[in-house]
Amino acid sequence: MATKGSDCARTRIYVVGPSSTGKTTLCNALAKKLDLHDSAYITEVARTVIKERGFTRAHIGLLEMQEAIMDAQIDRERETRGAYPIQLFDRSALDPIVYAVLTGRSDLDGKERGESLSRKDNFQETLAEYRKPSSFFFLLAPVEEWLIDDGTRHLDNGQECFVIFERVLSGLGISYRVIGENMKGLSDRTSAVLNVANLQ
């Protein structure tokens, strides 16, 4: 399924949400089910950026860190844009905006930080892609018992982060579907994504 196709046939799937919602697990299952070429599956870029730039979990509140992650994510998305009929993304350029808002010193500060990232030219270009009917966003709700501290991942307030994701997605005019805690089975989640994206 990973051969080159026409513009009208291209589908982009973005899986986003707070920590420990099963994003990567779901993406891996989707990639296997769809038999995606490695280059058609864009895995999490944040860990690479954090390692290469010398950031740690303690730097999560730095706008510089979120901007670096956003730029790296957008670069990865641009590299393969239009190359495959189906593309899968573990997270998106939207995620750094959410974390910029989440880690603001106040509601106003968070809003201003998020807006400063969303105004960037490269994000505005990417936003146009996110709004297309061929782009499908799936927001995973937090699952408390899945929370594991691996020393790198930011253990955010899952519910607050989820609410901010909803607010940012809606505010930017991006359509999305929620996969809630009531759907924990991997096969059920995989089928739900494929059905919505018309890939079943």
Image (spheres, rainbow, N blue to C red):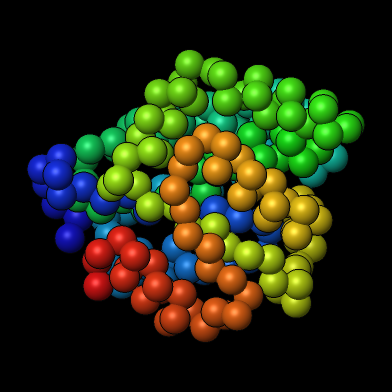
Instruction: Say which quarter of the image contains residue 80.
Output: top left
Instruction: Say which quarter of the image contains residue 46.
Output: top right
How many numbered marks does the figure carry? 0
> What residue is drawn where x is 74% and y is 36%?
101
Q: Position of residue 62 (x, y in %)?
A: 78, 28
Q: Is residue 107 above or below residue 20?
A: above
Q: Position of residue 76 (x, y in %)?
A: 42, 35
Horizontal arrangement in the rendering, residue 28 relative to residue 23 (left or right): left
Residue 154 or residue 127, whichever sits in front: 127
Residue 49 seen in render: no
Furthest residue toward right: 105
Q: Position of residue 125 (x, y in %)?
A: 40, 23
Furthest residue toward left: 6
Q: Is residue 126 above or below residue 45?
A: above
Residue 82 or residue 161, whichever sits in front: 161
Residue 153 or residue 132, whichever sits in front: 132
Q: Quadrant of the N terminus?
A: bottom left
Q: Quadrant of the C terminus?
A: bottom left
Instruction: Say which quarter of the image contains residue 60.
Output: top right
Horizontal arrangement in the rendering, residue 168 relative to residue 161 (left or right): left
> What residue is drawn where x is 72% and y is 34%?
100
> What residue is drawn where x is 55% and y is 53%?
16
Q: Position of residue 87 (x, y in %)?
A: 31, 50
